[in-house]
Amino acid sequence: MTWRFGLFDSTFAPLVSTHWALLVALVFPLLMGGLAALFPPKRAWPVVLASVPLLASGGVLLIAFQEAGLLGWQWEIAGLILSLRLNGLSVLLLLTTQCIVVAAALYTPGHFRLTEPGPLARWLWPLMGVALSALSLIWLATDLLTLYIALELMGLAAVGMLMLSGKAPALLAGMRYLLLALVGSLTYLLGVALILGQWGRLDLQGLAEVIEPGPVAWFAAALIGAGLALKAALFPLHAWLTPVHENAWTPVSALHAGLVIKASMFMLLQLWSILLPDTFYAPRIIAWLGLLAIVWGGLLAWRTDSLKTLVASSTVAQLGYLMVAFPLLLGPDIAPLPRALAWEGFWLQLVGHAFAKAAMFMAAGNLILATGEHTLKGLAGTSRRLPLSLLVFGIASITLMGLPPSSGFTAKWMLLEAMIITQQWWAVAALLTGTLLTAAYVFRMFRYSFDETAPRHRYQPLAPGMDLIAMLLALTAFALGLLAHFPLELMHGGSP
Amino acid sequence: MNAAWLPLTALATSLLVAVTIFALPEEARRLRTTINIGAAVVKIILVTLMVRRVAAGHEDIFSFQVIGGLDFVLRIDALGVMFAGLSSLLWLCTTIYAIGYLEGSANRKRFFGFFSLCVASTIGIALADNLFTFLIFYEMLTLSTYPLVVHRGTEQALNAGRVYLRYTLSAGVVLLLGAVLLNNLTGDQSFSSEEGLGDYLNDHRGLLTLIFILLVSGLAVKAAMVPLHGWLPRAMVAPAPVSALLHAVAVVKAGAFGILRVVYDLYGIELSVELGVITGLAVAASITIIYGSLRAIAQQELKPLLAFSTVSQVSYVILGIGIFGPFGTVGALAHLLHQGLMKVTLFFCAGNYAEELGIHRIDEMDGAGKRMPLTSIAFTIGALGMIGLPPVAGFITKWYLGVGAIQAEMYWVVAVLVASSTLNAMYFLPILHRLWFRPGPSHGKGSWPHEQRLGRLETHGWLLWPMVFTALISLGAGLFAGLPYSPLDWAARVASGEYLP
């Protein structure tokens, strides 16, 4: 299992150009964030300029990986060895991250122009930069300490961004999130300390070789798992998620739901595959919780009256899909075929959901901004006045419902197939129930929007491009369904 | 020579139209109309090309890999062309009709955009070569129909939309489960493979039956088979063109077509008989036919009556499958086209009565034949065809089904056919009587509910001519059934491919 995460020695030394690309990918966002704090961009074009080198760095790394396979870098800094690796999965997640962050950044100037966000707004940019750098580092890091630092940075940046809107409920929710995130980090750190004390090392590749199943590994896995589950808003530790999104700015919500919680999910799977490669019960517990998450998240989204709560609760349910796949990835005696299917389905689902959820938050933000209403009822009649925002919402929700031909569908097909091969019928039931529940809450929202008998409101016109950016994200999630071959091909290669 | 562009272009014409229409502003009425009609004509030309290529024995395939072991495949075959031809011919008629019908109403951009998307889905369904591809377009049809059902945005329309989704999305989930199970058992199974699934019979009898039940019950919802038909009469709240094309033709036929694919191309007719599921299908279809007709008799309004008549008539296709033998198959396939032509005519007529005279209820139709002669003649042709009187197309179907049933020694099917024809007559003949023989407002007795003078002729030309055209074709399909390329001829061609090696 660990080879899938690229934790083995690479054959080729990386080229010089990849060093530069790596540097740009990790440091450039910080520089640009700082610059934007000094001179906040009023229009989208400075953001476009800034995103060119960033996306280019991602492109260079992609090409380098396709040519050479697994890339590994190593430096010695003050007696500590820092090593990074880039395998197919890291490339995929890195590109996803860069695309979504760039989209969110492009969306921001228009959003600020229309909302008059106050003096704190300029600090969004550096925090966004930190979050991007930290996320990129998480996909690349190979030791527990770097992972911890990146996780902490990302978490703090996320808290900062969510609290920036400055409203009292936002501050309250943000403080709660901060406390929980700190508790999560602390729990994680305890697990790391346990590992360090027992085996005396922190690099993942080395740990994968020395760790033996036993109480220490289990206890460490439990601590790390609990900490990360809290940060990833896995059921039943999800209650902080909705209030936080309720009051956050749209681009921040898009980033947070699309990427930040996914990073914790990624780390959880990676670390458990090292600590608990053959445990029977732990992945099953996650999967059962996932089943509950699908149902509970779906019901929350179904019953709510607030549009943002709907979108945020749907994240809880969608994470359930990923959790349900755990027993197919971790555990003893899983045949290679279902494991490979589940592995690809898992990441396709994660990436598809990242794009779709970011798009959905932006569409929801646009609808709220244009109507001035936060409730579903306030959307009555919008199908005539705001067709584009609704269309984006619709395309994104096709991915979330997992209807063809979206990436959600292809991922679900693969997961279903893996579950049927391994005869996990309850997981099949969970996935299919999830589809219907998602459809229930999505179409409840559409029902209001198609209502023609509602009174007419005045609508605030949106900045050009705000719908377009969201549309691009939604279409990416949609197109990844039929074009799934390309992202999945990245993950095929790279076995040692 | 493989013309991979052909299935792709056929699909792309309607898809691109949908995208273009969404991109155009609401006010660009003239441009939208031009694009719509232009694309519909191009589509008919493409389908004609397909017909010729299939007749010449070519097989055009477009495919690419989605994930390992799962491909997206479009293939032109005789059965698919049949459905594609039906939907593209009626797309043109219904588009013209809809332009006239929706004149001056709101949200036309949305309407025509999703309308094109629906037609694109039916083309995809027709050309799909494996269950995965079929499923993609089948679900696309579900989603793109929803905005059309709720088009009016009234409480009633929104409720109908909710019921529609409850039925179809649940069916989609069942179908998905069946498809994944089958894919798991047999790998990617092309509709064009000759073997069928006979190899798996010995080891997986139970599983095969289960998958068959899952697939067919998923499809039966769209085909509106009892007891899964509840969405169809409610969806009649949609505007008349939607009822005409989608609920008489595209959506319900997509379900019936899917069942044809599963029985003939996926399982193979021998295996289906061996599993014993065929008889089950025939019984379910018979129940639907009788039940639909009985409910139709009880209706007070015209559109729900036509809806229940659809419930009943679509199941003739399923019944034809259930009659094991070439005649039954020919009847089933021909009815796929015949019923579509006749029912679309009837819905056009219903729409015209409602638009021109404000007639919704059957008891308001007295003497309408004098006021709207062409519409009433078209209605009469459609109604007589539904009853199965010669020379209208419906007669051909019933004849073939009857002969097939006698050959297969399924005499109870003959009884069902006779009973259903009687019932059809019981709900259509009184309407014809009212139209032609009862004095009404045009004889100076009472007044029409809401009369508008929409055109120089009896109604608006855009509403009139498509209806006249489909009525003539329904008549022609029956009169000239012996000519090459008639629906019957083509159905016989498909059936002989199925039964003769």
Image: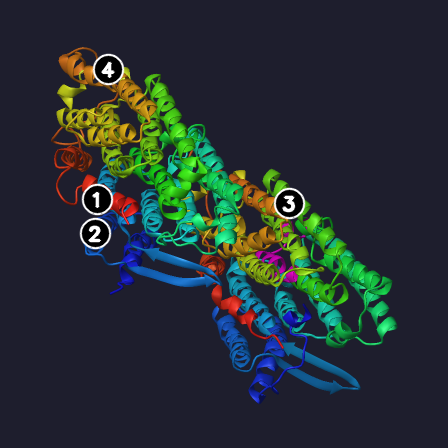
Give coordinates of residue B393: x percent, y percent.
19, 32
- B210 shown above or below A247: above
- Please name the amino acid that badge 1 sits on: Trp
Of all chains, the one bearing label 1 is B
What residue is pinned by disc 1?
B490
- Quick one: quadrant of the N terminus of chain A? bottom right
- A37 shown above or below B288: below
The stretch of residues the image draws in magenta is A243-262
- Please name the amino acid that badge 3 sits on: Trp
Identify the secondary structure beneath mark 1.
helix
The residue that appears at 15% across and 24% down in the rendered structure is: B372
- Please name the amino acid that badge 4 sits on: Pro
Residue A426: image tag: 3
Identify the secondary structure beneath mark 2.
helix
Q: CA distance from mark 3 to mark 1?
A: 46 Å
Mark toward the start of the polypeptide (4 vs 1) = 4
Of all chains, the one bearing label 2 is B
Q: Are marks 1 and 2 in contact (CB under 8 Å)?
A: yes
Mark toward the start of the polypeptide (2 vs 4) = 2
Q: CA distance from mark 4 to mark 1?
A: 35 Å
Q: Is residue A246 magenta?
A: yes
